[in-house]
Amino acid sequence: MQPPAAGSLRILHLSDTHLTGDGALHQGSVDTTAALDAVLAHVDGVPGVGLVVVSGDVSEDGSPESYRTARERIGAWAERHGAALVLVPGNHDLREGFRQVLANGHVLGEGGAPLAHTMEYTPPSVPVSGQSVVAGFRVVTVDTSVPGAGYGALSETALDRLRTALTGEPVPHGTVVVLHHPPVPSPTLLHEALRLQDPDDLAELLDGSDVRVVLGGHQHHHAVGSLAGVPVLVAPGVANDTDVVGPYDEESAHVAHGALIVDVGPDGSVWSTPVRVPDPDRDVLAFALDAGTVARIAEQAGPAAR
Ligand SMILES: [Fe+2]
C-alpha cells in the first residue's frame, strides 16, 4: 500500500472486536480472537501506521480476560509498528473490566511507548474519557455507551470533557474523535433503534472546532457520513459484517472481517481505505501483476505517456 503522505497521521481503525474471555464463539459462529488475528495479519504490511484505534465493542462479555486479549494482541501489533493505541468502550463493553486493563483507553502513546496511568477506582457510572497527542494530532475518546443499554448517548460528563479537550491547548494539525455509536443514520431497524441519541449535542461541539474526522463503529459495516461538516467514518466490524440490503426490519450478518486505513493530513484532508480480509474458500485471486508489469503499465497509461 502507498505510504502515508508527509505529515499525515495514518490510522488503523478497528472496531467491534467482540472478544470473549472464555473463548466462546460470538453469536455462536465466530471465533473473534482468530478474526482479530486474521485482520492484524492481513494489514501487517501496511506502512506508516502511527495510531491504532478500536472504536468500541472491544469485548463481548466485559471480562478482564477479554480486555487482556485486546491489550496483548493489538498492543503487540502497535508496538511492533511503532504506533500509538487508543480504545473506547461500546455498548457491549463493561467500564469496570475495561478500566481494569486499559485504564482510560489511551494505552500506547506516540511511537508505541506505553502511557502511564494512575489506576484509581472510578465507578462504572462515569464514562471513560481520555485524550492524547500523536504526531501533532489530538486524539479524543468519547464514551457513548449507556450502562445496561444498547443505544448510545452523550452524557453531560462526556460532553464536558470533549468541550474541555477541544478548547484546550492548540495542537498543530487538529483533532481525531473516536467513539462507538456513530452520529449518522443506520441501514437496519435494529441498529437505528440502537443509534446515538441527540447527535446535535455533538454537532454543536464539532461546529467550528479543529476536529478533522470522527471515527465510529457499532454498525458492523463500512459507512461514511458527516456531522457539522466533519467526516464521520464507520469501520467495518472485525467480528462480522451486517447485511445492509436485506429487509429493513430484519437483522443478519455474514462471517467477514475488515478494518479501515485512515490518513489524516496536516491540512485536515482525510483519505480512508476499507480493508476486507479475504476468505480463502471464496475469494479466488482474479489477477496479480508483479512490480515490473505495474511499472510498465503505469508508464504507458499514466500522464507521462501523453
Ligand atoms: Fe458491535
Image (spheres, grey):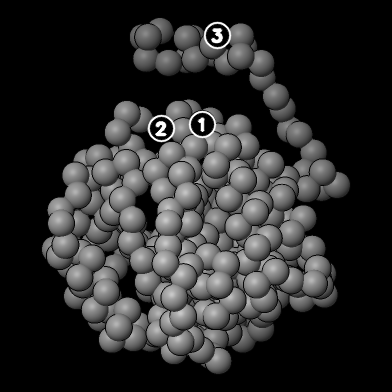
Side of 208 where 96 appears, left or right: right
What is the quadrant of residue 76 in the picture?
top right
Q: Give the residue number, with chain letter if any, for mark 1.
A: 47
Residue located farthest toward the right when viewing the structure as drawn: 281
Q: Quadrant of the C terminus?
A: top left
Point 55% across, 8% down: residue: 296
- Three-letter amino acid code at disc 1? Pro
Point 58% across, 50% down: residue: 75
- Three-letter amino acid code at disc 2? Pro
> First in sequence: mark 2 or mark 1?
2
Side of 216 where 239 appears, left or right: right
Which circle, 3 or 2, is nearer the viewer? Answer: 2
Q: Give the residue number, with chain letter if any, for mark 3.
A: 296
Secondary structure beneath disc 2?
loop
Q: Give the residue number, with chain letter if any, for mark 2.
A: 4
Point 19% across, 44% down: residue: 172
> First in sequence: mark 3 or mark 1?
1
